[in-house]
Amino acid sequence: MTTPAAQHPPTPLRIGNASGFYGDRFDAMREMLTGGRLDVLTGDYLAELTMLILGRDRLKDPSTGYARTFLRQLEECLGLAHERGVRIVANAGGLNPAGLAEDVRKLTDRLGIPARVAHVEGDDLTAHHPNSLAAHAYLGAFGIAACLREGADVVVTGRVTDAALVAGPAAAHFGWGPADHDRLAGAVVAGHVLECGTQATGGNYAFFAEHAEHAEHAEHAEHAEHAEHAEHAEHAEHAEHAEHAGRAGRAGRAGHVVRQDLRALPALRALRHPGFPLAEIHADGTSVITKHPGTGGLVDVGTVTAQLLYETQGARYAGPDVTARLDTVRLVQEGPDRVRIHGVRGEAPPPTLKLGLNRLGGFRNEVTFVLTGLDIEHKAALVREQLEAVLRAAKSRPADVSWNLVRTDRPDAPTEETASALLRLVVRDPDQDTVGRTLSGAAVELALASYPGFHVLAPPGKGAPYGVFEAKYVPQDTVAQVAVLDDGRRIPVPPPRDTLVLREPREPALPEPLPAGPTRSAPLGLLAGARSGDKGGDANVGVWVRSDDAWRWLAHTLTVARFRELLPETADLTVVRHILPNLRALNFTVEGILGEGVAAQHRFDPQAKALGEWLRSRHLDIPEALL
């Protein structure tokens, strides 16, 4: 049901973020509470890997299973939140939201702070999946909204969608109902931008060097005298480093490297400690993404675009409450560190909820051999044959054996490290002894009997358990979401009445291609930004550009075939391209590249965090007019 028109529009709701993952900056909660005005402060502590970690914690102690950092942060900051009237909403409950809520109540009693604590439950379906360590449905916003409407000051949840941490408070504040699809979709998009913390304010940003340069110019203009002193110090330090480098026989080159690093330091100061983001949510679902004044980092259309593309797949971004149409999102730079999100359209959610299953997959072990100097390929072949002979002769060969030679070496290298390549062996098996004792003994016994210069980065251990993540889907009406209030009352949260089976929208028309003209071979990243991440065993790579002409080129050039050509690891995998013209962006889903998910550590970069940066480093012919 739609909120009735009011004589004066409701005040925008200021929602901040203080955590993008379990292990994020501890002081962020205090920084956000003291840095400026907020109505709600959220924290996202859960990821696929986190659920596995918390599941293993709970095996050791059933009273755990939640993010303990959150409780320590509250001990320092709950008084500040109470004084400032800021409500706190976090998914730190993990596998045990009721246990965390009870421990927060004990904390409020001990501190003498009259805070009402509520929690949301119903996501835990582990009992229905006996072979899993943890099985949790992704709940939506209305359990959180129910807690807040009943006066909760602190709301903790288990597995909810990351965006629900923002959409829930917005729904409670503005009185939105399940049928307010456009408004909910706007809040979901804002929540997706906030959920990873400083990734919205310059963290992990493809064009960080450009903004560092801008920050340097601004800083020099404001602090000319300080800059002059810094320059003198730089020259002195540079001279000292150059002298040491000269003694090593590399004065010119080493001095240049040091000089470049020192020049960069003042410029990077603005990005060294980025502030956490906040969203000003309006009653119509539009929002402004910003940060507290005076904090580091930056908020611009690029940083918001990067986060919008992160870990999303397709133009329809489905959730428990609404499907947000990412192809309708429009971004406008309203001022310094202020980006308005508008135009977002929503549709009824799918009839199913995503279910994340975490289980133990078996045991893994690894050893990395260092190959230095000449004959790298022959050294790799020798040690591989030696180890394979042992594995073949063993009672039980590991179920999965993977070799990977990484050519980090270079000819005539100035240091031993840069003269060395790495040969990585990873084994997996359901049995710990099969990956432990056999591999460890064989690797150690080769110490004096293999290639010249034999050594390893670290000796292999006994073998460690690894986890597997699997996504399934369950009907919405089979999951009983409940808001549990401070006084013990339990409020059932019904599933949405209107649902819509998820379908890919029709592919939008491409812009007119650029006219032919001179080109030169250059890295894609000179023109395009990228951000990549994981969803189970799949990876997504979002690529965007910042001008209409660049979009005309990118949309026609970066096809699936060209993507596979630039990233040969994807050549035999299913790659799907999604087109988002309003963002001048393409989003690629690479199916299966991460094997059984991050915990299985299938590849060198198990969460595909740098897949986009690899793509940006690849060369292709780019029109000179765009460079």
Image (cartoon, rainbow, N blue to C red):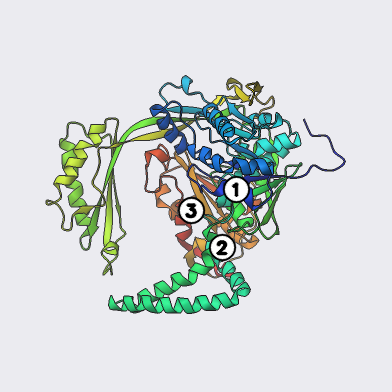
Q: Identify which residue, 296 or 190, lies in the foreground.
A: 296
Q: Which mark is residue 612?
A: 3
Q: Position of residue 361 (x, y in %)?
A: 36, 32
Circle 2 — which element?
A: helix
Q: Amino acid at mark 3?
A: Gly
Please state, as top left, top right, bottom left or bottom right, where the N terminus lies in the image. top right
Does residue 333 appear anywhere in the picture? yes
Residue occupying the far left of the picture:
449
Q: Amino acid at mark 1?
A: Leu
Identify which residue is drawn at 42% across, 40% down. Answer: 598
Q: Amino acid at mark 2?
A: Ala
Residue labelled with disc 1: 308
Q: CA distance from mark 3 to mark 2?
A: 24 Å
Identify which residue is drawn at 68% across, 54% down. Answer: 339
Q: Position of residue 560 (x, y in %)?
A: 50, 49
Please state, as top left, top right, bottom left or bottom right, where the C terminus lies in the image. bottom right
Identify which residue is drawn at 63% across, 72% down. Answer: 222
Q: Which mark is residue 270?
A: 2
Upstream in sequence: badge 3 or badge 1: 1
